[in-house]
């Protein structure tokens, strides 16, 4: 019966030109190498190796056979590695939920690095943080990239594990040519007439911050539009039609906009990697480690 060990022995002899060196490379004894060669030659009914005082070399038939089996062995070894990687990762596919702005800058790079380490596939679902947390809790995704206001409790619960990646202060996004862009800091008491581009969801962290600040001042907040489209948000602000509350990581440099701090405390947006407190595929943990390293390097 033909075996993979026989193929490996034959190729090792061809590469090293000696039974002894082939045995060392394979971590076999010379008798084991000899046994495999004899078994292969008996199966094929042909001499594959000849020995002389200079070592060992393949016969013409041996070279022919080695040339045919070498790519086959390479493919088999590649397939074995892929199976082992997927076995160690614990899943063929993992699913990750993420919000669009910062997620679009982090998740693709993290997936690319993860795929260098493992053959595991990653499916990405785009959703707002509250939706992502719901998907994680329901087990529909393995993990999620979320954010919340650092001064608020955020997404708490004994069923979740949050790995904090980074925090950024909230700032006001204004048109570059706006008079507001010339100020070092904006006082919300002077922004009563400003219209704001808000999220379609009332649970959006930045909208909660805006409502809190305006309520503390006893001034009503004006809304220009509700949208989650980042291009629309930047476009409206760049044309001087309104302002938006955001962070530096979410700013698109292709638009004529700038960020300005406020005199009031707007808090920070904290970005976290969240999973359920349950056994997870190893690849989920690897993805979290990669995201931590990527965000640390960018800071």
Image (tube, rainbow, N blue to C red):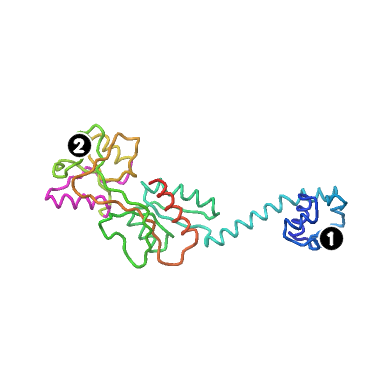
Residue 290 percent across, percent down from the top left:
46, 53
Image mark for residue 83: none
Choose top left, top right, bottom left or bottom right for residue 40: bottom right
Based on the picture, tell me whether residue 252 belongs to the magenta stretch: no
Residue 299 drawn at (x, y percent): 38, 46
| Quadrant location of the N terminus in the rendered image | bottom right
Q: Is residue 40 left or right of residue 172?
A: right
Between the C-alphas of marks 1 and 2, the distance is 87 Å
Badge 1 is on which residue?
38
| Vertical comparison of 107 with 134: above or below | above
Q: How many numbered marks are there?
A: 2
> Which residue is more in the foreground, 38 or 255?
38
SS type, badge 1: helix
Kindly identify the residue that appears in the image at 22 percent across and 39 percent down: 242
Q: Is residue 76 left or right of residue 7?
A: left
Which disc is residue 183 wearing? Answer: 2
Work out whether mark 1 precedes mark 2 in sequence or the reverse, and give the earlier one: 1
Q: Is 226 a magenta residue?
A: yes
Q: Could you say whether the residue bearing mark 2 is in a helix, strand or loop?
A: loop
Q: Position of residue 189 (x, y in %)?
A: 13, 44
Residue drawn at (86%, 53%) of the image: 51
The foreground one among 257 and 94 is 257
The percent coordinates of residue 128 (x first, y second) are: 34, 53
Direction left: furthest residue: 218
Q: Which residues are magenta?
A: 203-230
In this view, 253 is above or below 227: above
Q: Name the residue nearer the viewer: 95 or 288.
A: 288
80 to the left or right of 165 = right
Task: Give the residue at the far top of this rendering.
Answer: 177
Foreground of the two, 191 or 231: 191
**Residue ID at (48%, 54%):** 122
């Amino acid at each position: 019966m033909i075996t993979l060990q026989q193929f490996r022995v034959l190729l090792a002899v061809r590469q090293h030109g000696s039974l002894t060196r082939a045995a060392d490379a394979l971590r076999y004894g010379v008798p084991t190498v000899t046994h495999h060669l004899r078994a292969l030659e008996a199966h094929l009914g042909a001499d594959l190796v000849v020995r002389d005082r200079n070592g060992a070399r393949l016969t013409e038939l041996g070279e022919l056979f080695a040339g045919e089996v070498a790519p086959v062995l390479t493919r088999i070894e590649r397939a074995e590695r892929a199976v082992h990687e997927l076995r160690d990762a614990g899943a063929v596919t993992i699913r990750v939920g993420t919000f669009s702005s910062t997620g679009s800058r982090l998740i693709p790079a993290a997936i690319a690095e993860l795929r260098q380490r493992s053959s595991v596939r990653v499916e990405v679902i785009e959703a707002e943080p509250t939706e992502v947390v719901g998907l994680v809790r329901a087990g529909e995704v393995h993990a999620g990239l979320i954010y919340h206001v650092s001064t608020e409790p955020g997404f708490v619960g004994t069923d979740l594990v949050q790995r904090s990646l980074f925090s950024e202060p909230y700032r006001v996004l204004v048109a570059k040519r706006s008079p507001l862009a010339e100020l070092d800091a904006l006082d919300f008491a002077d922004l009563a007439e400003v219209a704001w581009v808000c999220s379609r969801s009332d649970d959006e962290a930045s909208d909660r911050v805006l409502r809190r600040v305006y309520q503390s001042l006893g001034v009503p907040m004006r809304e220009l539009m509700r949208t989650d489209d980042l291009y629309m948000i930047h476009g409206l602000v760049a044309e001087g039609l309104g302002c938006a509350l955001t962070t530096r990581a979410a700013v698109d440099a292709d638009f004529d906009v700038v960020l300005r701090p406020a005199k009031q405390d707007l808090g920070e947006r904290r970005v976290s990697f969240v999973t359920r407190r349950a056994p997870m595929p190893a690849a989920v943990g690897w993805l979290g480690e990669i995201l931590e390293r990527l965000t640390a390097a960018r800071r």
